[in-house]
Amino acid sequence: MDKIVVYAGTFDPITNGHLDIMKRAVKLFKKLVILVVAHTEKSPLFSLEERMKFIQEATKECKGIEIDSFDGLLMDYMKKKGANIVIRGLRAVSDFDYEFQLAQLNRKLYSEVETVFVMPSEEHFFLSSSMLKEIASYRGDVSLFVPKIVSEALKERFCSK
């Protein structure tokens, strides 16, 4: 039986760190569903459609990746799709405590789910979407940290303000 593997997030916007996690995950599993969270309390800078477009463009060369969106609890999506593995990225030791709690909570909500933690390469370890949005808001160059389509969108978004 093929495992349905899900990497969920806001991806606002997708970074090279996210891409690194995705590429590592598809080495481990034949197919990876990138699940873009539709509704979030984070007030995303980019719309769901824009975030999905960025991911589509950034992963067009990657085999085994499917992109989907969902508005609700991740475990509800997992049950609906019959998915049983969640990929979570760990950047630093400080991420582990939160991610460990989340994994335990998810297991209580859906006992069939397993969480697989994947660490990005050291060149992407420090990246976060919120940090990159802040740099871009001051018109800083983020082109080393995000796909080209995202870099251009951030420039457009902040230079038009």
Image (spheres, grey):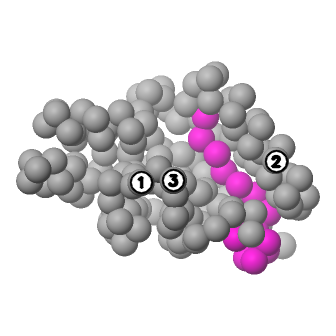
Report the amino acid beneath label 1: Ser
Instruction: Specify whether residue 65 is in view.
Output: no
Q: Is residue 2 left or right of residue 48?
A: right
Residue farthest to the top, as pictured: 93
Q: Are marks 1 and 3 in contact (CB under 8 Å)?
A: yes
Q: Position of residue 16 (x, y in %)?
A: 39, 44
Q: Is residue 76 magenta?
A: no
Instruction: Specify whether residue 15 is in view.
Output: yes
Report the amino acid beneath label 2: Leu
The residue that mark 1 highlights is: 43
**Extent of the magenta region:** 77-90
Q: Position of residue 74 (x, y in %)?
A: 68, 62
Q: Position of residue 32 (x, y in %)?
A: 61, 63
Q: Which mark is residue 92?
A: none
The residue that mark 2 highlights is: 105
- Tell me how far mark 1 sits from mark 3, CA to CA: 6 Å
- Tell me how far mark 2 sits from mark 1, CA to CA: 24 Å
Q: Is residue 81 magenta?
A: yes
Q: Position of residue 26 (x, y in %)?
A: 59, 57
